[in-house]
Image: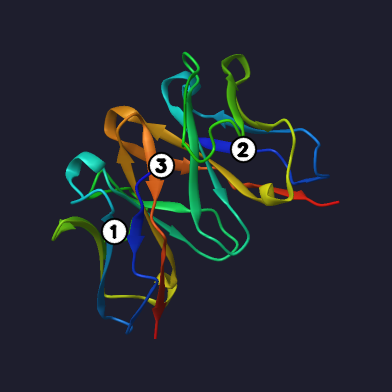
Amino acid sequence: QAVVTQEPSLTVSPGGTVTLTCGSSTGAVTSGHYPYWFQQKPGQAPRTLIYDTSNKHSWTPARFSGSLLGGKAALTLSGAQPEDEAEYYCLLSYSGALYVFGTGTKVTVL
Amino acid sequence: EVQLVQSGAEVKKPGESLKISCKGSGYSFTSYWIGWVRQMPGKGLEWMGIIYPGDSDTRYSPSFQGQVTISADKSISTAYLQWSSLKASDTAMYYCVRYAEAVYDMDVWGKGTTVTVSS
């Protein structure tokens, strides 16, 4: 089974920009992995921010964007707010409806 | 309103069986997949498997194949996750999530069911 790797932790200043990445042990992440990004705050269920690489939901703040960057999936937060402090997980789709979550990135806004 | 409502917290002993549920409402239950996700205490999210209630097509993550059973009863718009013999290591929060295959979107999450297995 593939291993999906994320940065363990990142710190961003209020109003600053940070990019989280999501890599696959099987090689480059492509649009065919349909990358997802989820936000989870302590004691809460995850919330989907991004699906299919770059698509947003109505509840996704405009400051979040998804892309492919250097063979990885990426989530960019531009103009960080205190409420963005959370754990972020990516999810990749592999063949046969097999999905694998990333290891998670704890984002601190400080 | 589209919702996934999960069953309440469970406390079980090792070796006991358990079936938890995830009831969909506000949409056509048979037209979306339902996935199950485990989160052990203080740990990350793990994908367990997915079911299409329309025809009960089920896919398991290799890590969970043979360890759990995913099923659905479309007549009552409910998906299930069950264990035949619980272990202490099954102690975790379990989430269900709706998946729209046509647009590759996982949008609605249940609030989770806490399962505690302790002697």
Which secondary structure lies at badge 2? Answer: strand
Q: Label 1 vs label 2: CA separation? A: 30 Å
Residue B107 circle label: 3
The residue depicted at 74 percent of the width and 50 percent of the height is B88
Number of marks drawn: 3
Give me the chain letter of mark 1. Answer: A
Image location of residue A51, percent across then percent down: 30, 46
Q: Which of A25 and A42 is in front in this view?
A: A25
Q: Label 3 vs label 2: CA separation? A: 14 Å
* Residue ID for mark 1: A22
* Circle nearer the viewer, 1 or 2: 1
Same chain for labels 1 and 3? Say yes or no. Answer: no
Q: Mark 1 touching mark 3, by CB under 8 A?
A: no
Q: Nearer the viewer, residue B49 or A45?
A: B49
The residue depicted at 56 percent of the width and 44 percent of the height is B95
Residue B13 in the figure: left or right of residue A79? right
Seen in the picture, residue A76 relative to A52 is either above or below; the reply is below
Seen in the picture, residue B51 relative to A84 is either above or below; the reply is above
Seen in the picture, residue B16 relative to B117 is either above or below; the reply is above
* Residue ID for mark 2: B5
